[in-house]
Amino acid sequence: MAHLLGFLLLLLGLCGDLVSGGQPSAPRPLEALNYTLPTAKYRIQQAYEVGPISALFRMVHVFLYVVQPHAFPEDTVRKIIQKKFEPSVDYEKVVYYEMGIIICSFLGLLFILLMPLVGCFVCICRCCNKCGGKMHQREKEDMVFRRKCLGATLLVICILISLGIIYGFVANHQVRTRVKRTRRLADSTFRDLRTFLDQTPKQIKYILAQYNTTKDLAFSDLNNINSKLGGEICGQLKPVVIPVLDEIKAMATADSSGYHPMSFPSSSQVPLEPSCRRHVCWACVRCSEAGCIPTAIRETKEALESMKSSLDSLHSSSEQLNRSLTDVRTSVEQSLQDPQCLVQPGVETCSSIQTSLSQLQGNSELGQLPSVDAELNKVNDVLSTDLDGMVEQGYKSFNDIPERVQQQSTAVVAEIKKVLDSTGSEIDSVTQQLPIKETLDNFIGYMNESEKYLHDILPKVEEADSYWWLVCLIICFLLTLIIIFFNLGLLLGVCGYNRLATPTTRGCVSNTGGIFLMVGAGLSFLFSWILMLLVVVAFIVGANMEKLICEPYANRKLFRVLDTPYLLNEDWKYYLSGMVLSKPDIKLTFEQVYSDCKDDKGIYTTLQLQNRFNITEQLDIGQHTQKLVREFESMNINLDGIVLLDDSGKRNLQEFSECGIDKIDYASYLTQTGKSPTKVNLLSFAYDLEAKANHLPPGNLKNSMKEAAQNITAIHEQQVIPMEQSLVTLHRSVKTLQLTSGSLQGVNKTLYSLDDAQNFITRNISSIIIKETKKFGRTIISHFEYYLQWVEYAITEKLASCKPVATALDSTVQVIFCTYLTDPLNLFWFGIGKATLLLLPALILGIKLAKYYRRMESEDVYDDEPLRY
């Protein structure tokens, strides 16, 4: 046992050469990094559960508290340990503390001394027919009452004695059962300790392996610096640059399906208002009453071309119409020179026709509408420039940013990778400095020696337990035999008792019951003092084990005694810090170590090993990350020369905005398009002329009028109708151009936006590069900051979590020593002691009660009728 306790004490100092730093809280993990230190699964997970018998153990604890209510004498124990049990120790305090146990032991000794002496006197006295030994019984009036009271009281005492015997049997069984469990518990404890020792190197390997995970993540970011850093720079410029380029792109090109090709991958196509009847990128949604900016140049050209075509057609058609109408009017006027117009009834008809000829004219203003050739030529000049190609160059200049970033950062990235590789070597070097293997080898050797000692002593303990079990079993059976005699005496006495029989005529059954009661009393006199002797010895040992070891261990007062300065070593203020840290002035206590181990803290924090090797200094986060900071600060990325649209493109847009379509008199065009090509409806005029001709008498005049009506009808069909269609087309083109001209303001806004975007790039590109480079650097550095913080946290808080050590100590002291040994021992003496003490009143009652059941040799004789009872 001494080897085992020494082994557990050394276990508290395990890994005294392990390294770690303070006790930082665990940092918040990054999304891509989530380290979890591997943990072992131990066989002993929680405290031993006693079960229902714990109620009996608590009952004994209450009794011991009543007997020994004094608190654990810490000061006295300290003095005893310091003076090494010399006679000069003040034992008055010891006696005061042990007063309850001493008194109980003294009473037990009196019982041991007096019981056989009294038994001897009683035996001699009864043999001399004294002390109730004479077989004569006087009949009294209260004999019935006294017999019943004595019988009931003896029965109750027998029941109480039986409970004590049951406690003894239970305690004896518990000792035997738990001694057998001790080997399994010890094996599980040592197996857990070996798992604990084996797990520590695995945890260290895991910590080192996670550096490669962190480094791979950083290398991945560095290899993709074009998308990580360049993409972020683009992201800062995109909201300003892309909408402008999209607008210019939309003005410059449109495919046949009505969609505008976007060169930038983030552009999306969304539907415009119904009036636009097309889809464009999100940045080009600019619909208003003036028209749509998308494809403004091409729509302007199409509208101008349509308008020019309509105007040319109207000019030529108007001249031809006027000539045709003039020819018809001249022909009719010549025909009206006919003599029939001078006589009735032709005079009035000819006069009416002559008057209406003035209406037969075309709309001369249609031929005077101004041309749009100048505006169309300007728009064609604009379209002759490859504006679409210029915009594509702007997109390319913007989209080349990630590639330029990667090309310009190649050297710095290579240096950063070297720094990361060297940092990994430094961390590996720090961990190689840990003398873990040597410490573990020494500890494993000591643990093997302790296990061997335990396995050697356990068979002896089990052998001793078998003798103890046999002795306790004999004691319990002896008490059981005594109780059997008392119970049989009661049973036979009650069953064989005859109310009509006189003391000298009692039956055999009743007499046998009385004899059994006397045998029980005799056995009680004979063996009770021996039983009490065993009870006193077990009481002294068990009570002191409970009060001096188990109870102070449970409330940790025992640790406070061991933590007394200069107690275990006169030269060391704190024994544990002197043994583990070689610095006895550092306050490292057994109680603190035990508490930390119970909380499953790491050995480093538990044993305050930062006083030997400070991991915080060795893994200085600032020292390792400062190199990376310097490398990122040396990264020089130059993105000058980003041109969204060159001067020719801007000039092209400026020329379009000055093409003059906004100065066209659209009102005059729309006014003329609302008029008819002729002053009168030619069909109506022809019908009217033909009707008037029908009133003329037959002849040349009538025929010429009908012919003129047919010519007018033909002019309407062949010339007027096409002109009306041209007017409709012109009206539509004018309206379209009028709406499109409103986009010129949008062009100007686009130019302003383009200048703003270009100025934004020129002014802010350097600050954006610096900002995003720092942000990218912080991302890389944060991986290693988190890793180094986690390493420090893992070593200080999780590495070699010593809960198995506390569990092993609890298994040895609290479970094996207290629960397996002390509690059953105390329950045994408590039950047997109670039964033995109750034998005294039992034998007195048995002797007195036996006289009521035994057959007497003589009895009182009365002249009157004998008393019946």
Image (tube, grey):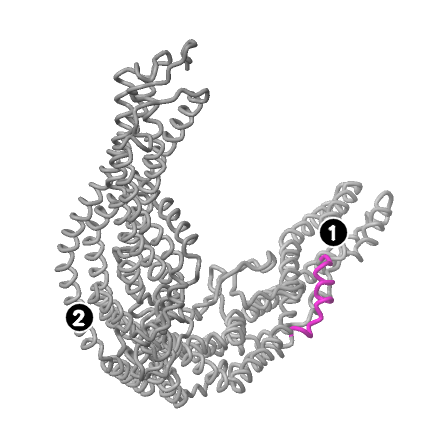
Q: Nearer the viewer, residue 185 or 639?
A: 185
- Badge 2 local density, few (<14 within 10 Å), some, or many (20+)? some
Instruction: Look at discs 1 and 2 and give the one toward the viewer.
Output: 2
Relative to 501, say whether 70 is above or below. Answer: below
Q: Is residue 439 left or right of residue 581?
A: left
Q: In which quarter of the image is residue 14?
A: bottom left
**670 is within the stretch colored magenta:** yes
Label 1 sits on a secondary structure element that is loop
User: Which kind of residue does numbered mark 2 sit on?
Assistant: Tyr
Relative to 580, say whether 125 is above or below. Answer: above
Q: Distance between the residues labelled 1 and 2?
A: 128 Å
Q: Is residue 802 left or right of residue 727?
A: left
Q: Is residue 169 visible?
A: no
User: Which numbered disc, 1 or 2, marks the residue that appears first in the sequence?
Assistant: 2
Position of residue 322 measured from the top left corner of the image (x, y, whole percent): 70, 62
**368 is within the stretch colored magenta:** no
Position of residue 254 measured from the top left corner of the image (x, y, whole percent): 49, 66
Residue position for label 1: 681
User: Which kind of residue does numbered mark 1 sit on?
Assistant: Asn
Relative to 117, say whether 45 is above or below. Answer: below
Q: Quadrant of the N terminus?
A: bottom left
Residue position for label 2: 446
Magenta segment main secondary structure: helix
Label 2 sits on a secondary structure element that is helix
The structure residue drawn at horizontal position 42% and vertical position 88%, both measured from the top left corner, is 638
Q: In which quarter of the image is the C terminus?
A: top left
Q: Outermost residue toward the front?
A: 863
What segment carries the magenta color?
A: 661-676
Q: Outermost residue toward the top?
A: 865
Q: Is residue 744 visible?
A: yes
Position of residue 251 measured from the top left corner of the image (x, y, whole percent): 54, 71
Q: Quadrant of residue 19?
A: bottom left
